[in-house]
Image (cartoon, grey):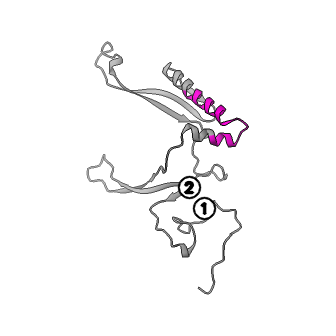
Amino acid sequence: MAIPFKRMGRKDPREVDGVVKYHPQLVTQGQSVDLDKLAYTMKEKSSLSLGDIQSVLTNLVEAMRAALFDGKSVNIRDFGVFSLSATTLGADTKEECTMKNIRSVNINFRPSSSVRPNLTSTRAGEKIEFLDLDAPKKKKTEGGDPGDEGGGDSGGGNGDGGGEAPDPAA
């Protein structure tokens, strides 16, 4: 599956007369995956029941929350580290700097290198592919995938070149 993106024009806000430059912006589509969907996916790859996995995931969330609220970071090996940070107001003196200066608390996540996206990977399970949502759509009679501008294999096939060969007379 490819990660969809669209092209967005932006000016550099630091430059008064900055020119618009276009940047790819990743697009999240559909509903987010919740704990139940994750549990179902995990059930398909293990011998545990759906209820067992749901219970473990629910307890993981509760235990992580308790550890974070106790001032600890949570390191999940081969996934990443969760920690808290705060948005605060500055104070002129040390005595004026109190908990009232904390405006919000955020949860940070630092992924481990094993889950960090790698754009240069050549391994099938690790390769990230992108789908240009703004690319001109090809007609179904031309064949090919929508958004594929003839730029090579999308990685979804099995390499046998399935389908019909184009008519050389056309």
Residue extending furthest bottom?
169
Residue displayed at 54% across by 66% down: 148
Question: How far across and how far down the image is residue 131, in percent?
Answer: 52, 58
Left-right relation of 138 to 102: right
Highlighted magenta segment, given as a residue range: 40-61
Label 2 belongs to which residue? 2
- Tell me which secondary structure the magenta stretch mostly adopts: helix
Cβ–Cβ below 8 Å for labels 1 and 2? yes
Spatial separation of the CA atoms under disc 1 and disc 2:
9 Å
Residue extending furthest right?
47
Residue extending furthest top?
95
Residue displayed at 63% across by 60% down: 156
Does the segment drawn in magenta span residue 167?
no
Label 1 belongs to which residue? 154
How many numbered dots are placed on residues in this image?
A: 2
Q: Quadrant of residue 92?
A: top left
